[in-house]
Amino acid sequence: MNLPFVSREQLVVGVDIGSHSVKICELKKTDKGYQIVALGSAVLPEGAVDDGTLVEPEAVGEVIAGLFKNLKVKNKKVGFSISGYSVIVKKVNLAVMGEKELEDYIMQEAEQYIPFDISDVYLDFQDLKTNTEKNDRTDVMLVAAKKEIVDDYLEMLKSINLQPAIVDVDGFALENTYETVYEKSENVALVDIGASKMNINILSEGISVVARDIVVGSRQLTEQIQGAFDLEYEEAEALKLGQTPAEDRQEEMEDIFSSTCTQWVLEIKKAIDLYHSNNPDKPLTRLVLSGGGCKVVGLSDFLESETSIPVEIFNPFSNMNYNKKKIDAGYIERIGPEMAIASGIAIRPTVI
Ligand SMILES: Nc1ncnc2c1ncn2[C@@H]1O[C@H](COP(=O)(O)OP(=O)(O)OP(=O)(O)O)[C@@H](O)[C@H]1O
Ligand SMILES: [Mg+2]
């Protein structure tokens, strides 16, 4: 969704509000490609964001305002993205129409495709132009987002003097970053594993053909560790991240990691199988992982052995320039996978 008050040349600051942390990314377009201006993340209080909903807008606002201040970001124009139950993305196959005719059709007929009351949602669509000489029908991507939820985000951002200009969807932002960094023509599965959800987006020749959010993520590991050893959430998180040595808990920890990762891999395989059964002649050439959850040691090797498809960890900044005196190269390497959505929002206006 492109709100009207931002010019196409101007880049917004990408703000990815996850359930574990807020990530912000500011980029600049130069003759040599994108340049990183500012980058950072901050952990949110427990439960402040849940299933894509702002449960504690004030607390989230404070964290975001703090990040802007610490990183000295002056640009007030921001983009954010939504996910979870409040947003429905649906591909519909329609007869080819002109832009205005398509818009009228969607406004009139959206109700049959979207399980929400149309007056309760913001609607957007994109003609994917999949029609060919032999086929006069085209796929149109419909997006419906609950006004109530989107308005909460808009209000929260305005309350800290930011100017929201773009509302994106997590899966689209991920696709956007990928297409900027890699070749568009590949058949690839993008998998973002966050704290509470896994977003799978399979692209075939540059078009999203399977898109789903699944309610699994790295928080599952923390909660299981917490339960197994009777710990506070933060203690379990530190143990999970290896900040506290596992010692005699090692074996039980390995069991927790292995059963949870097996579940993640099964979910990914289900989406891949669905894709391959619909597209037997277009095999996937790689799986690209992002989000903090993909950093679980051994996950990418396990996924690769289970699917026989090369797996790589996404670094959206691999081809971007930055001031090496201001931003540490190691930090960019470490934070890259978590930044896949924020960077996708940050490049949005120039590619729409
Ligand atoms: N090395 C690691 N091993 C396991 N988990 C990790 C590692 N590093 C970070 N994480 C986990 O990744 C999660 C944070 O990732 P991310 O920032 O992508 O989530 P989020 O965007 O806030 O959540 P979501 O998108 O699910 O709402 C946390 O649960 C964190 O513990
Ligand atoms: Mg996330």
Image: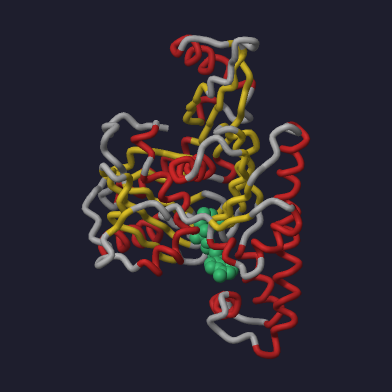
Q: Is residue 342 above or below residue 208?
A: below
- Residue 82 visible in the picture: no
**In the picture, residue 277 is in which quadrant?**
top right
Q: Is residue 27 visible?
A: yes
Q: Is residue 255 left or right of residue 170?
A: right
x and y percentages locating residue 348 in the rendered image: 38, 39
Horizontal side, residue 308 vs residue 99: left or right: right
Quarter of the figure that contains the C terminus: top left
Relative vertical location of residue 296 with respect to residue 10 in this rendering, above or below: below
Q: Is residue 306 left or right of residue 130?
A: right
Tell me residue 258's x, y (percent).
74, 69
Q: Residue at x 72, y 76 (%)?
A: 254
Quadrant assignment for ligand 1:
bottom right
User: Where residue 107 sits in the image (x, y, percent)?
Assistant: 51, 17
Q: Nearer the viewer, residue 31 or 315?
A: 31
Q: Residue at x 33, y 68 (%)?
A: 328
Answer with left or right where residue 185 lies relative to residue 306: left
Q: Position of residue 292 (x, y in %)?
A: 54, 62
**Residue 248 occupies quadrant:** bottom right
244 or 300: nearer the viewer: 300
- Give the residue at the far bottom of this rendering: 248
104 w.r.t. 277: above or below: above
Q: Which quarter of the rendered picture does the N terminus lie within?
A: top left
